[in-house]
Image: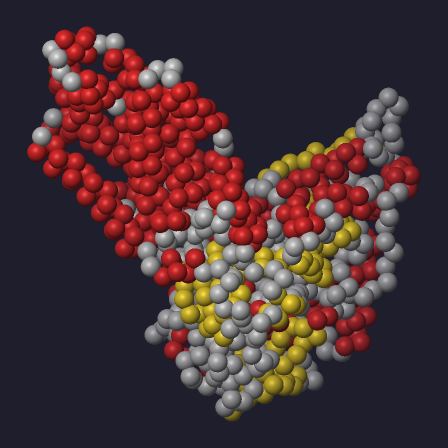
Amino acid sequence: MFIYLIKRLLAVVPIILFAIFLMFALIRLSPVDPAEAYLAAANIHPTDEILAEKRHEFGLDQPLLVQYVQTVKKIVQLDFGNSYVTNTPVWQEVATRMPATIQLAVSSIILSIVVSVPLGFLAAIYKNSLIDHLSRLLSYLGASIPQFWLGYVLIFLFSVKLDMFPVEGRGTWQHFVLPSITLSLALIAIYTRLLRASVLEELENVYVIYGRTRGIKEKTIMVKHVLRIAISPMLTGLGMNLGKLLTGTIIVEQVFSWPGFGRFFIEAIFNRDIPVIQGYVVLAACLFIVCNLIVDLVQLYIDPRISRKGMAES
Amino acid sequence: MQKYKTKKGLLIAFVASIFLVTAGCSNDDAASQSNESTEGSSTSITMSWPRDIGAMNPHVYNPSQLLTQSMIYEPLVSYEEGGELKPHLAESWTISEDGLEYTFKLRENVKFTDGSPFDASIVKKNFDTIMENKSSHSWLGVINVLEKTEVIDDLTFKMVLSEPYYPALQDLAVVRPVRFLGESGFPEDGDTSKGITKPVGTGPWILEDYKKDEYATFTRNPDYWGDAPEAEKVTIKIIPDAETRVLAFEKGELDLIYGEGAISMDSFNHLKESGEYKTDLSEPVGTRSLLLNTTNEKLADLNVRLALQHGFNKEAMVEGITLGIEEKADKILSTNFPYTDVEVDAIEYDVEKAASYLDEAGWKMPSGKSIREKDGQPLELELMYDKTDPIQKAMAETLQAEWSAIGVKLNITGVELTVQIERRKAGDFDVDFWYNYGAPYDPHSFINVVAEEGWGVSEAHSKLPMKEELNKQVDAALASTDETERQELYGTILKTLQEQSVIVPVSYMKKTVVYQNGIEEFVFPANRDEHPFNEINVSQ
């Protein structure tokens, strides 16, 4: 287990380095000159002298390799520089917006689990029943409705017409309802079908028949054995989506005026705030990696066979 | 089993703690704040704004918002309807005959919200910190010619210029940077470019509560020297999405949606046609124009420029694309700016005339072809537009179709805004979209960029035979101390520019406002960047 963990952690290093390289290359490939972008944000008329001075200050006149090494060095020290627009450290800007994003991500994930686990499980056990058809309909809807449209529809119905929830903003539990539903519907669609399929697969296994012949209660077989194993693919999906949600749910944050990380990123793109874009990309990569790692560890705990397999391979 | 229960408990505790910790980072006031609708106090106004209001520092730019900066900080001189300059924090002023010395008599008994007096020494202190960061403010003409400032006595302040510059007073009316921060707002080293300690102004509003990216609440300044606004409180909710703004307005969470581009043209018309709300359009705030670059040999020919101007149905294009919100523009500058009421001939849509101009210029239509040619070269041009701007894109596509009918091949290229600006400055374009600056910056900022290189506009005019003369006229107009002479010079400059058709006026852009019936009257501020809250009448 410990060795597995060390191996996984070591594998993170090249992935992050690759993410930094990709981000570095993409920014250099973009037609936007960071020095120009800085001067535009600071409202300084870009004369040739000031541009040259800024390019020198940002190290843009150095060879690309030197620039890349400098970038990696700074990022390793968690120094993402200052935002061109607000002139405050990117790290600080991100920290003030993270709580809002984390809250929304966690509430959406909880809502997705609360709905999709029983729904997917029941849809598998009662295959081709009403509940199975309902889960299928919900999945079709969730998979095909664009999030921004769903957001507007929910606001229009439940906020403008029925006056049940606020249109936008953050602060009370009511503010969580509509954005969480908007984010969850797509997740529920995927998880319900995923869980249904894997439960059906598990039900075919010998251990289920064996359990039944041993006289173990059906409920125990289903919950303690079938569900425990069948939930594994869903957990993997959950980890990936948690990473996605934590990096800011750009569209939903925009539609519901949610003051999170994603909305901040959109503003940074419009302002060509390169240090923020750079910081966002690296942090997003790290968040994805960490979330996946956590999910793997949880899976290891739920299904020890994975750990044994890993060790056997090593 | 016990082990499982403990683990489950731990998981629940973990999730709950995430919520508590993150909720702890948020201010509980947000709850009461965002729930507060317009039904509360009858004299409160709730409005939305697309971006956070930023640091309320009077001497910095983005991300500070002009709207809210103007609520707290005031100018020496204010810009009113038709460009009239009126006393504000300065009660009166005198200008020396040579146009170099401006002496301001400051208004008596004006206090900052920290209780400190507004006097000549604090005016100087503000000017000093602004001048310390001159490079950030060099876009403003008066900063470039400001030689020194002096405190004559408690209520008399003098500004000495290095050369005469008539728009100095207009420049003092802009929202930033020449507005005044109170003593207790200054940081220890006095350099406001790095930040201020608190927003202390003389204006009619005080920032009472603020939550980044969520809202800002302003209350009426009880000690305000001027006429107190009717509303007691203004709440600005930060709603980045235009459609959400409309939904919040329809629900009654907002009293008004105001600003340039604050609402889509479709939504504006939808709310207007519903008959449930009041809507209004401002006077033109600027002109949407096309810039034809004369450094391109084809466009150096006046006949080609005139042909292009005659060659598209401006009225139909503007009406169709802006849904009647913008108005067809015949003059480069609308006449609600000073010195712009100049008689010029409008260039009307006339395809035949366009064709004859092109024939005259030697661009003939070879038989069997659809693009005109001259010396074997096709009449092909490139129009650059900001790819994120749907109006520019739609207009580019219309022009492409319209001009192809007169035998001009127009290639349209969508680019990043920064690339558009960069290419314009470098003169690397054939046709581009361009906007003037609006009140209180025009017409002087407009004629300035026609003469001064570095913005792309002067460069686009560079092959005009009278360019040198034009530059001299611009310099003379900006330095002129004689009102009549200045009017004449403006007349000549604007007439020349209009006749030369390097700048092709397309439409007059307007601000929109949509408001609930509870607001009795809404008046658009004359200054494009100023807030409108002093003039709003709220029904009791």
Residue at coordinates 41% horizontally, 30% vertically from top-left?
A186
Along the horizontal axis of the image, is B80 left or right of A12? Answer: right
Along the horizontal axis of the image, is B489 left or right of B155? Answer: right
Q: Quadrant of the C terminus of chain B?
A: bottom right
Q: Is residue A39 above or below residue B189?
A: above
Q: Quadrant of the N terminus of chain B?
A: top left
Residue at coordinates 53% horizontally, 48% vertically from top-left?
A160
Compare residues A32 and A62 and report the one nearer the observer. A32
Compare residues B76 and A144 and report the one nearer the observer. A144
Structure colour scheme: secondary structure
Along the horizontal axis of the image, is B254 left or right of A281? Answer: right
Residue at coordinates 62% horizontally, 59% vertically from top-left?
B515
Q: Quick check: can you spot residue B291?
A: no
Compare residues A169 and B373 and report the one nearer the observer. A169
Which quarter of the figure has residue A89? bottom left
Q: Is residue A102 above or below residue B482?
A: above
* Residue at the extreme bottom of the image, as rendered: B153
x and y, in percent, of residue B537 in the image: 62, 71
x and y, in percent, of residue B336 in the image: 75, 65
Q: Is residue A213 above or below residue B47?
A: above
Which quarter of the figure has residue B164? bottom right
Which quarter of the figure has residue A206? top left
* Residue at the extreme left of the image, as rendered: B2
Q: Quick check: can you spot residue A79?
A: yes
Number of dots carrying numbers: 0
x and y, in percent, of residue B50 in the image: 52, 53
Along the horizontal axis of the image, is A237 left or right of B288? Answer: left
Residue at coordinates 53% horizontally, 46% vertically from top-left?
A161
x and y, in percent, of residue B470 in the image: 76, 61
